[in-house]
Each structure stands twice: as C-alpha cells, then as structure tokens.
Image (cartoon, grey):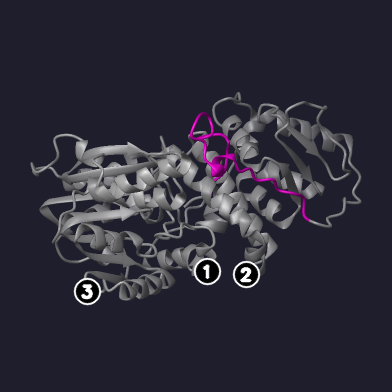
Amino acid sequence: MSANIEMDQEMGQGRGQSDASRARTSVKPAAGRSLSTQSVTALDRWIARKMLAVVGDPPIVLKLWDGFDVTAPQDGAVAVLQYHRRSAMLKTILNPELYFGDLYASGEVSVSGDLVKFMEIIYDNLGNKVQKSWLRSLVLWLQHRRIANSFDKAKDNIYHHYDIGNDFYRLWLDQAEMQYTCAYFPDQDMTLEQAQVAKLHHVCRKLELKPGDRVVEAGCGWGGLALFMAKHYGVVVTAYNISREQVAFARERAASEGLSDRVEYVLDDYRNISGEFDAFVSVGMLEHVGKPDFETLGAVINRCLKPEGRGLIHSIGRNRPAPMNAWIERRVFPGAYPPSLQEMMQIFEPNALSVLDVENLRLHYSLTLQNWLQRYEQHSDEITTMMDAAFVKTWRLYLAGSIAAFNVGELQLFQVVFSRAQNNQVPWSREHLYRQRPVEVAAARQRQARSA
C-alpha cells in the first residue's frame, strides 16, 4: 500500500545509496494556471503565517494567490507551497489530511521542490515537535469515518485500488514477480527486482517450507509469491483473492509456467478459506482486513492450520494505534487500516497462537517506495494518457507521502511469524534465514562483478 515518498532521506544516509534513493520528485504548478483575481488581505497573510507557525515554521516558502511570498526570504527552503485561491487555504485549515490531497490533485495548491522532504517536514512537525494549542487542535481535527470491510464492501474497496488495470501497475512495479508489497534489501545496491526476489525467499525461509507442504495464502496479489513457493520450494498452494483482474492475471501466468496443478487461485474472500494446511501466509492483506475483523481472521487461521503448522503475516503497521490518513482512505486505499502490534495480537491471543518472531522492515519499505516513485515518474506521461492529470498527481502524492511516512516513523512494516502454542517443532535460532542458497550466492557475485 503504500504511498511512498522518495528521499535521500532514509537509505541515502551513507554508503550504498541507490539511484532510487537519490531520485527526487519535483512537482510543478499546474501548467497554465493563472493567479486568482482575488485580492490578498492582511487577514489572509496573518492566517497563512499562523498555519506555518502551527507546524513549527518549517523551511518552506509559502505563496498566496497574488504570487508574492508570505514568508521571509530563507536559505535552504526545501519546497515552495502556493495556494491559488483563498478557499483552498481555508479548506486546508478545516481538514488538512482530507483536503490537501484533493487540492493538490486539482491544481488549487501547487508544490515545487522536494515533495518527499516537504511531506516529511509536515509529518514530523505535526507529530511530536509542536506544542499543543487551540489552533493546532483545529488544524489536526479530522473527519475520520471508518469504511467498513463487509464481504460486499471489501470487494468494492479492492476493486477501487487493485482493479485500476494491470497495465498501470506493470509500468512501475518490479518486472520479476510484480510485487506490490515491501521488498527486502539485504544489500542496498540491489535492484528492485533482486530485492523482491530476496523478500520472497525471506518469507519462505521464515515459514520453513519443504517439498510437499500445503500452503494457503490470503490475499495473493498478482500471484507471484504462490508461484515462487511452488517453483522454488516444491509446495502446493491455494491462494485466495477478491480482485478479479489480479486472479485472472495469476491464473494465466500459472498456466503459462506449467504450474496450474500446484497452484490454485481462488476468487473468494479469505473468510471462506477451507481445508487444512501446513503453512498460512498473508503478505500485504492485513491492512485491508480492518481491526473489527482481526478476530475473524484469527479464527480462520485457527481452523485451517495443522497442529505443527506455521504462519506469517506481513503488514504495514504503526507503533501505536491511529486512524488511517483520511485522504488516502477516501481517495486511494478505501478501508485500509495499518494496525499496531498490540492490535495484531487480537489475531493470535484468542486462538492460542504463539508469536515466534517479529521483524520491522520500515526502511526497506522506504527504499521500495523510492524505486516505485522513480519508475512512476519515468512513465508519468504514459499514465496521464491512460488516466488523467489529476490521477497522476494523486498517486504521486500518495507514493511520496508514503515514503515520508516510513522515513519519519509514522508507518512501520511488520513481519510476524507464529505457530500453535503447543508446537515444539520450531527453529532454535534465526540461522536458517540467512543461509544463502546457491542461486543467491551466484546473484551476489554477479552484483559484485558489475560494481567492480
């Protein structure tokens, strides 16, 4: 999920900085937008200055609809924010989380400069660094209304985000496995393709897959993990998904690779999973489940996992409970909710499932998003033709904002491994996770040879 904001920020703090982490997103004002004929009053300027004060007077140049700066000249400004009409500024004050994205997409607000850094500053300063005040309370007042995830609504939510079209996602996801989830970068110089394959191995090792295992996957995306498990680990997979386009794509790929007899893609809700399995895996689905249904998911796992079965849930999360960004939930990712670890325990505790391992891959997701945003920008003209200019800006802000959220710690990426409480067939250490297979050793040597 993710809106992912590029930065020299996260991974670009030392050696091994990738090309993606050096990529910056400069967002220019909408072409041809003229300045409003509205006059700027002293009150307008006072309000604008107060807006900046609320977020700690960040290094941002603020312009109003007359084209003149509200802020004093400053060195090191990371971005220029311009309001093109008074109503846009007032909407931002009323509900910044919900309205800023709409105003940016429509061109009523423009940002030039480093969009990721701009979003990082806003996230950071609206978090812990600003003193409480009545004005801050007003700015942070959000109209959060949860979007439910009933059977029918879950389908609508998934269609809204994932059934935009496979051609759209092909433009900027990895070309190896078409993964729309966090990659794993044991080496920061890895390509996106290499890091996504590394993620798949990492997941399979955590599950300790062996030939002949029966695996169930809840929310399989375009089917890459299921095929990978069958191809490289000799397991039989049943994968559930409610996205029609993704299931059609996955079935076609399984047939073309001769794996239809070992991988079954089921167009159905995870709540209808049936049968018994050696392993349960869910990568990037929990964000869509919604907290009220965590116990339901736990009950599904409990009924389908064998006595010595293993499980893994990979999900965007938070350090403490908080609502999803209102704009992302309404415009991009309806029904999404990144849980805290405490909230995730609602899946495990009622069903006597023991958590064996937790890993936080927050900065790996930041780097993943940097790669996505870089590729997205490379194809922005093509995406404009496919969709429209407002769509391009909406997803640019979503990706950039997501990068910023991971950079400043607003979002986390948890991988949680679990099993039944009475299962004693569990690993004694993590050594098995980092033992390289021959194919990975060869790939590492190729990367070293290219960089030499």
Helix, strand or loop at mark 2: helix
Give whichever of 371, 384 is nearer the camera: 371
Residues at circles 2 and 1 in contact by the CB criterion of under 8 Å: yes
Between discs 3 and 2, the one toward the N terminus: 3
Image x and y of residue 334, in percent: 49, 58
Between discs 3 and 1, the one toward the N terminus: 1
Q: Residues within 10 Å of mark 1 (few under 14, many from 20)?
A: few
Amino acid carrying label 3: it is: Asp
* Above or below for 337 versus 125: below
Amino acid carrying label 2: it is: Met
Question: Could you tell me how far apart the alpha carbons at marks 3 and 1 are, in whole angstroms?
Answer: 27 Å
- Horizontally, residue 379 falls left or right of residue 68, namely left
Q: Measuring 42% from the left and 46% from the top, which residue is drawn there? A: 338
Amino acid carrying label 1: it is: Asp
Residue 13 in magenta stretch = yes
Q: Which residue is mark 2?
A: 386
Question: Could you tell me how far apart the alpha carbons at marks 3 and 2 are, in whole angstroms?
Answer: 36 Å
Image x and y of residue 143, in percent: 57, 48
Tell me the number on the disc at residue 261. 3
- Horizontally, residue 168 falls left or right of residue 238, namely right
Helix, strand or loop at mark 1: helix
Stretch in magenta: 3-30
Q: Which residue is mark 1?
A: 167
Question: Could you tell me how far apart the alpha carbons at marks 2 and 1 are, in whole angstroms?
Answer: 9 Å
Res 317 seen here? no
Of discs 3 and 2, which sits in the foreground? 3
* Above or below for 156 versus 127: below
